[in-house]
Image (cartoon, helix red, strand yellow):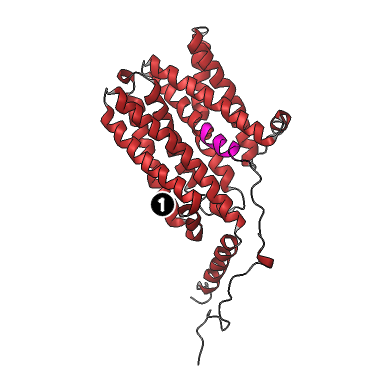
Amino acid sequence: MSRRRGESIVPDAEFRSYYGRQIIKSPTWKVPDVPAYLFLGGLAGGSAVMAALADLTGRPELRRTGRVAAAAGAGASVLALVHDLGRPLRFLNMLRVLKPTSPLSVGSWILAPFSGLTAAAAASDLTGLLPGTGRLAGTAAAVLGPAMTTYTAVLLADTAVPGWHEVHRELPFVFAGSAVSSAGGIALLATPTAQAAPARRMAITGSALELAAEHRMLRRAGLAAEAYDTGTPGRLLRASRILTWAGAVAAGAAGRDRRIAAVAGSCLAVAGAAARFGIFEAGRVTARDPRYTVVPQRERANAAVAAPTGADG
Protein backbone atom coordinates (compact mmCIF):
# COMPACT_ATOMS: atom_id res chain seq x y z
CA MET A 1 0.00 0.00 0.00
CA SER A 2 1.39 3.37 -1.01
CA ARG A 3 1.81 6.14 1.53
CA ARG A 4 0.89 9.78 0.95
CA ARG A 5 3.55 12.42 1.39
CA GLY A 6 3.76 13.72 4.97
CA GLU A 7 1.81 10.72 6.35
CA SER A 8 3.59 8.95 9.19
CA ILE A 9 3.93 5.13 9.06
CA VAL A 10 4.26 5.10 12.85
CA PRO A 11 0.99 5.09 14.80
CA ASP A 12 0.34 8.00 17.15
CA ALA A 13 1.91 7.36 20.53
CA GLU A 14 -0.12 7.54 23.69
CA PHE A 15 0.77 10.64 25.67
CA ARG A 16 3.03 10.10 28.68
CA SER A 17 5.43 12.26 30.64
CA TYR A 18 8.49 11.20 32.58
CA TYR A 19 7.08 9.36 35.62
CA GLY A 20 3.94 11.48 35.17
CA ARG A 21 5.77 14.54 36.42
CA GLN A 22 5.25 18.17 35.42
CA ILE A 23 7.23 19.49 32.48
CA ILE A 24 7.15 23.13 33.53
CA LYS A 25 7.15 24.59 37.01
CA SER A 26 3.92 25.85 38.47
CA PRO A 27 3.81 29.61 39.07
CA THR A 28 5.13 30.43 42.52
CA TRP A 29 2.80 33.44 42.84
CA LYS A 30 0.57 33.32 45.90
CA VAL A 31 -3.21 33.18 46.14
CA PRO A 32 -5.03 35.47 46.84
CA ASP A 33 -2.21 38.02 46.51
CA VAL A 34 -1.58 37.86 42.77
CA PRO A 35 -5.18 37.43 41.53
CA ALA A 36 -6.13 40.36 43.77
CA TYR A 37 -3.22 42.34 42.32
CA LEU A 38 -4.49 41.59 38.81
CA PHE A 39 -8.03 42.71 39.65
CA LEU A 40 -7.21 45.80 41.70
CA GLY A 41 -4.68 47.15 39.22
CA GLY A 42 -7.16 46.88 36.36
CA LEU A 43 -9.91 48.47 38.42
CA ALA A 44 -7.58 51.35 39.30
CA GLY A 45 -6.63 51.93 35.67
CA GLY A 46 -10.23 52.05 34.49
CA SER A 47 -11.22 54.33 37.38
CA ALA A 48 -8.42 56.80 36.62
CA VAL A 49 -9.61 57.18 33.03
CA MET A 50 -13.19 57.61 34.19
CA ALA A 51 -12.17 60.28 36.70
CA ALA A 52 -10.33 62.31 34.06
CA LEU A 53 -13.29 62.16 31.68
CA ALA A 54 -15.65 63.17 34.51
CA ASP A 55 -13.41 66.13 35.26
CA LEU A 56 -13.53 67.24 31.62
CA THR A 57 -17.33 67.00 31.51
CA GLY A 58 -18.02 68.75 34.81
CA ARG A 59 -19.11 65.84 37.01
CA PRO A 60 -17.33 66.43 40.34
CA GLU A 61 -18.97 63.55 42.24
CA LEU A 62 -18.08 61.02 39.56
CA ARG A 63 -14.57 62.50 39.38
CA ARG A 64 -14.11 62.09 43.11
CA THR A 65 -15.37 58.50 43.03
CA GLY A 66 -13.00 57.66 40.19
CA ARG A 67 -9.99 59.28 41.83
CA VAL A 68 -10.59 57.61 45.18
CA ALA A 69 -11.23 54.21 43.55
CA ALA A 70 -8.07 54.57 41.45
CA ALA A 71 -5.95 55.49 44.47
CA ALA A 72 -7.41 52.76 46.67
CA GLY A 73 -7.10 50.13 43.95
CA ALA A 74 -3.54 51.08 43.08
CA GLY A 75 -2.47 51.20 46.72
CA ALA A 76 -4.06 47.84 47.51
CA SER A 77 -2.53 46.39 44.33
CA VAL A 78 0.95 47.46 45.46
CA LEU A 79 0.35 45.95 48.91
CA ALA A 80 -0.78 42.65 47.37
CA LEU A 81 2.29 42.56 45.15
CA VAL A 82 4.66 43.39 48.01
CA HIS A 83 3.04 40.71 50.17
CA ASP A 84 3.55 38.18 47.40
CA LEU A 85 7.21 39.22 47.04
CA GLY A 86 7.71 38.92 50.78
CA ARG A 87 9.60 42.16 51.40
CA PRO A 88 9.03 45.76 50.21
CA LEU A 89 12.69 45.99 49.21
CA ARG A 90 12.12 43.44 46.45
CA PHE A 91 9.58 45.71 44.82
CA LEU A 92 11.98 48.64 45.04
CA ASN A 93 14.73 46.50 43.52
CA MET A 94 12.55 45.97 40.44
CA LEU A 95 12.73 49.73 39.84
CA ARG A 96 16.53 49.85 39.74
CA VAL A 97 16.61 49.04 36.01
CA LEU A 98 14.00 49.41 33.26
CA LYS A 99 14.03 46.40 30.91
CA PRO A 100 11.71 47.02 27.94
CA THR A 101 11.80 43.30 27.07
CA SER A 102 10.46 42.31 30.52
CA PRO A 103 6.71 42.76 31.14
CA LEU A 104 7.37 42.56 34.88
CA SER A 105 9.93 45.37 34.74
CA VAL A 106 7.74 47.56 32.53
CA GLY A 107 4.73 46.82 34.69
CA SER A 108 6.59 47.86 37.83
CA TRP A 109 7.51 51.15 36.18
CA ILE A 110 3.86 51.69 35.26
CA LEU A 111 2.49 50.76 38.69
CA ALA A 112 4.90 52.84 40.77
CA PRO A 113 4.24 56.29 39.21
CA PHE A 114 0.56 55.48 38.69
CA SER A 115 0.14 54.81 42.41
CA GLY A 116 1.75 58.11 43.35
CA LEU A 117 -0.26 60.09 40.82
CA THR A 118 -3.60 58.60 41.85
CA ALA A 119 -2.82 59.18 45.53
CA ALA A 120 -2.02 62.85 44.82
CA ALA A 121 -5.18 63.33 42.73
CA ALA A 122 -7.41 61.71 45.36
CA ALA A 123 -5.84 63.69 48.21
CA SER A 124 -6.38 66.94 46.34
CA ASP A 125 -10.01 66.11 45.62
CA LEU A 126 -10.82 65.04 49.17
CA THR A 127 -9.11 68.00 50.85
CA GLY A 128 -9.75 70.70 48.26
CA LEU A 129 -6.07 71.65 48.35
CA LEU A 130 -3.96 72.30 45.24
CA PRO A 131 -6.75 71.62 42.71
CA GLY A 132 -4.46 72.43 39.78
CA THR A 133 -1.90 69.90 40.93
CA GLY A 134 -4.65 67.37 41.53
CA ARG A 135 -5.99 67.83 38.03
CA LEU A 136 -2.52 67.45 36.53
CA ALA A 137 -1.89 64.29 38.57
CA GLY A 138 -5.28 62.88 37.60
CA THR A 139 -4.65 63.54 33.92
CA ALA A 140 -1.23 61.88 34.06
CA ALA A 141 -2.74 58.88 35.85
CA ALA A 142 -5.40 58.62 33.14
CA VAL A 143 -2.65 58.46 30.49
CA LEU A 144 -1.20 55.44 32.30
CA GLY A 145 -4.66 53.97 32.97
CA PRO A 146 -5.02 51.88 29.79
CA ALA A 147 -1.62 50.29 30.40
CA MET A 148 -2.70 49.47 33.96
CA THR A 149 -5.72 47.59 32.63
CA THR A 150 -3.73 45.38 30.26
CA TYR A 151 -0.10 44.99 31.32
CA THR A 152 -0.93 42.22 33.81
CA ALA A 153 -2.43 40.18 30.95
CA VAL A 154 0.84 40.57 29.04
CA LEU A 155 2.70 39.56 32.20
CA LEU A 156 0.75 36.29 32.40
CA ALA A 157 0.89 35.55 28.67
CA ASP A 158 4.66 36.04 28.54
CA THR A 159 5.19 32.97 30.75
CA ALA A 160 5.48 29.34 29.62
CA VAL A 161 2.17 28.47 31.30
CA PRO A 162 0.03 27.00 28.47
CA GLY A 163 -3.29 28.29 29.76
CA TRP A 164 -2.04 31.86 29.56
CA HIS A 165 0.42 31.72 26.69
CA GLU A 166 -2.00 30.02 24.28
CA VAL A 167 -4.43 32.98 24.64
CA HIS A 168 -1.87 35.79 24.54
CA ARG A 169 -3.74 37.64 21.77
CA GLU A 170 -7.13 37.73 23.50
CA LEU A 171 -6.17 37.99 27.17
CA PRO A 172 -5.40 41.76 27.16
CA PHE A 173 -8.84 42.47 25.69
CA VAL A 174 -10.49 40.31 28.36
CA PHE A 175 -8.63 42.16 31.09
CA ALA A 176 -9.34 45.57 29.57
CA GLY A 177 -13.07 44.89 29.26
CA SER A 178 -13.24 43.53 32.78
CA ALA A 179 -11.35 46.54 34.17
CA VAL A 180 -13.66 49.03 32.45
CA SER A 181 -16.83 47.24 33.58
CA SER A 182 -15.52 46.91 37.16
CA ALA A 183 -14.62 50.61 37.27
CA GLY A 184 -18.07 51.47 36.01
CA GLY A 185 -19.59 49.15 38.61
CA ILE A 186 -17.73 50.75 41.51
CA ALA A 187 -18.82 54.18 40.28
CA LEU A 188 -22.46 53.05 40.15
CA LEU A 189 -22.18 51.98 43.78
CA ALA A 190 -20.69 55.24 45.04
CA THR A 191 -21.92 58.02 42.74
CA PRO A 192 -25.29 59.83 42.78
CA THR A 193 -27.37 58.66 39.85
CA ALA A 194 -27.63 62.18 38.44
CA GLN A 195 -23.92 62.06 37.54
CA ALA A 196 -23.58 58.32 36.92
CA ALA A 197 -24.58 58.15 33.23
CA PRO A 198 -20.95 57.81 32.01
CA ALA A 199 -20.39 55.03 34.57
CA ARG A 200 -23.41 53.16 33.20
CA ARG A 201 -22.03 53.44 29.68
CA MET A 202 -18.62 52.23 30.85
CA ALA A 203 -20.22 49.27 32.62
CA ILE A 204 -22.13 48.21 29.51
CA THR A 205 -19.27 48.79 27.06
CA GLY A 206 -16.72 47.03 29.25
CA SER A 207 -19.04 44.07 29.80
CA ALA A 208 -19.61 43.68 26.07
CA LEU A 209 -15.87 43.78 25.36
CA GLU A 210 -15.08 41.31 28.12
CA LEU A 211 -17.74 38.79 27.10
CA ALA A 212 -16.86 38.96 23.41
CA ALA A 213 -13.12 38.69 24.04
CA GLU A 214 -13.56 35.81 26.48
CA HIS A 215 -15.74 33.93 23.99
CA ARG A 216 -13.09 34.34 21.30
CA MET A 217 -10.35 33.41 23.77
CA LEU A 218 -11.99 30.10 24.65
CA ARG A 219 -12.59 29.27 20.99
CA ARG A 220 -8.93 29.81 20.17
CA ALA A 221 -7.45 28.27 23.32
CA GLY A 222 -7.36 24.74 21.94
CA LEU A 223 -6.80 22.08 24.57
CA ALA A 224 -6.30 24.74 27.26
CA ALA A 225 -9.99 25.69 26.94
CA GLU A 226 -10.71 22.53 28.92
CA ALA A 227 -8.99 24.03 31.98
CA TYR A 228 -11.10 27.18 31.69
CA ASP A 229 -14.33 25.19 31.56
CA THR A 230 -13.89 22.61 34.33
CA GLY A 231 -13.20 22.49 38.04
CA THR A 232 -12.70 25.62 40.11
CA PRO A 233 -11.71 27.84 37.13
CA GLY A 234 -14.83 26.80 35.25
CA ARG A 235 -17.09 27.60 38.19
CA LEU A 236 -15.47 30.98 38.74
CA LEU A 237 -15.63 31.97 35.08
CA ARG A 238 -19.23 30.85 34.67
CA ALA A 239 -20.17 32.88 37.73
CA SER A 240 -18.27 35.83 36.28
CA ARG A 241 -20.13 35.62 32.97
CA ILE A 242 -23.53 35.39 34.67
CA LEU A 243 -22.75 38.34 36.93
CA THR A 244 -21.37 40.37 34.02
CA TRP A 245 -24.53 39.81 32.00
CA ALA A 246 -26.72 40.64 35.00
CA GLY A 247 -24.67 43.73 35.83
CA ALA A 248 -24.77 45.04 32.26
CA VAL A 249 -28.53 44.55 32.00
CA ALA A 250 -29.09 46.20 35.38
CA ALA A 251 -26.82 49.11 34.43
CA GLY A 252 -28.84 49.68 31.29
CA ALA A 253 -32.10 49.60 33.23
CA ALA A 254 -30.90 51.61 36.25
CA GLY A 255 -31.62 55.14 35.04
CA ARG A 256 -32.02 57.16 38.25
CA ASP A 257 -33.01 54.15 40.37
CA ARG A 258 -30.35 53.96 43.06
CA ARG A 259 -31.19 50.39 44.07
CA ILE A 260 -30.86 48.95 40.57
CA ALA A 261 -27.60 50.88 40.11
CA ALA A 262 -26.27 49.33 43.32
CA VAL A 263 -27.20 45.85 42.10
CA ALA A 264 -25.45 46.50 38.81
CA GLY A 265 -22.34 47.81 40.52
CA SER A 266 -22.14 44.91 42.94
CA CYS A 267 -22.54 42.32 40.18
CA LEU A 268 -19.83 43.88 38.02
CA ALA A 269 -17.34 44.31 40.85
CA VAL A 270 -17.69 40.68 41.95
CA ALA A 271 -17.61 39.51 38.32
CA GLY A 272 -14.29 41.27 37.72
CA ALA A 273 -12.68 39.62 40.75
CA ALA A 274 -14.09 36.20 39.83
CA ALA A 275 -12.73 36.50 36.29
CA ARG A 276 -9.19 37.24 37.49
CA PHE A 277 -9.22 34.41 40.03
CA GLY A 278 -10.64 31.99 37.44
CA ILE A 279 -8.10 32.86 34.76
CA PHE A 280 -5.26 32.67 37.27
CA GLU A 281 -6.36 29.25 38.51
CA ALA A 282 -6.86 27.93 34.97
CA GLY A 283 -3.23 28.76 34.21
CA ARG A 284 -2.08 26.90 37.29
CA VAL A 285 -4.10 23.85 36.24
CA THR A 286 -2.41 23.75 32.83
CA ALA A 287 1.03 24.12 34.41
CA ARG A 288 0.49 21.11 36.68
CA ASP A 289 -0.69 18.78 33.90
CA PRO A 290 2.04 18.10 31.27
CA ARG A 291 -0.62 17.18 28.71
CA TYR A 292 -1.39 20.88 28.19
CA THR A 293 2.25 21.51 27.30
CA VAL A 294 3.08 18.52 25.11
CA VAL A 295 -0.11 17.89 23.12
CA PRO A 296 -0.33 21.40 21.56
CA GLN A 297 3.40 21.24 20.74
CA ARG A 298 2.90 17.94 18.93
CA GLU A 299 -0.11 19.28 17.08
CA ARG A 300 1.88 22.29 15.87
CA ALA A 301 4.80 20.07 14.84
CA ASN A 302 2.50 17.69 12.93
CA ALA A 303 0.76 20.62 11.23
CA ALA A 304 4.13 22.01 10.14
CA VAL A 305 5.14 18.64 8.66
CA ALA A 306 1.82 18.22 6.84
CA ALA A 307 1.83 21.76 5.43
CA PRO A 308 2.91 21.98 1.77
CA THR A 309 6.27 23.67 1.19
CA GLY A 310 7.17 26.10 -1.53
CA ALA A 311 9.18 23.45 -3.33
CA ASP A 312 6.21 21.10 -3.43
CA GLY A 313 4.09 23.79 -4.97
Res. 202 image quadrant: top left
Report if residue 22 lies within the magenta region.
no
In this view, the residue in front, 130 or 268, is 268
Residue 59 sits above or below residue 248 on the image? above
Q: Which residue is mark 1?
A: 216
Q: Label 1: state its secondary structure.
A: helix
Res. 66 image quadrant: top left
In this view, the residue in front, 271 or 201, is 271
Residue 208 sits above or below residue 123 on the image? below
Q: Is residue 116 left or right of residue 237?
A: right
Question: Majority secondary structure of the magenta segment?
Answer: helix
Q: Residue at x 57, y 45 (%)?
A: 156
Residue 72 in the image, given as x and y percentages of width and height: 53, 23
Residue 75 in the image, given as x and y percentages of width and height: 58, 25
Residue range of the region highlighted in magenta in the rendering: 30-40
Q: Residue at x 50, y 49 (%)?
A: 232
Give the crowd class for mark 1: few <14, some 14-19, many >=20 residues within 10 Å.
some
In this view, the residue in front, 232 or 176, is 232
Q: Residue at x 56, y 48 (%)?
A: 157
Residue 169 visible in the snapshot: no
Residue 53 in the image, given as x and y percentages of width and height: 40, 23
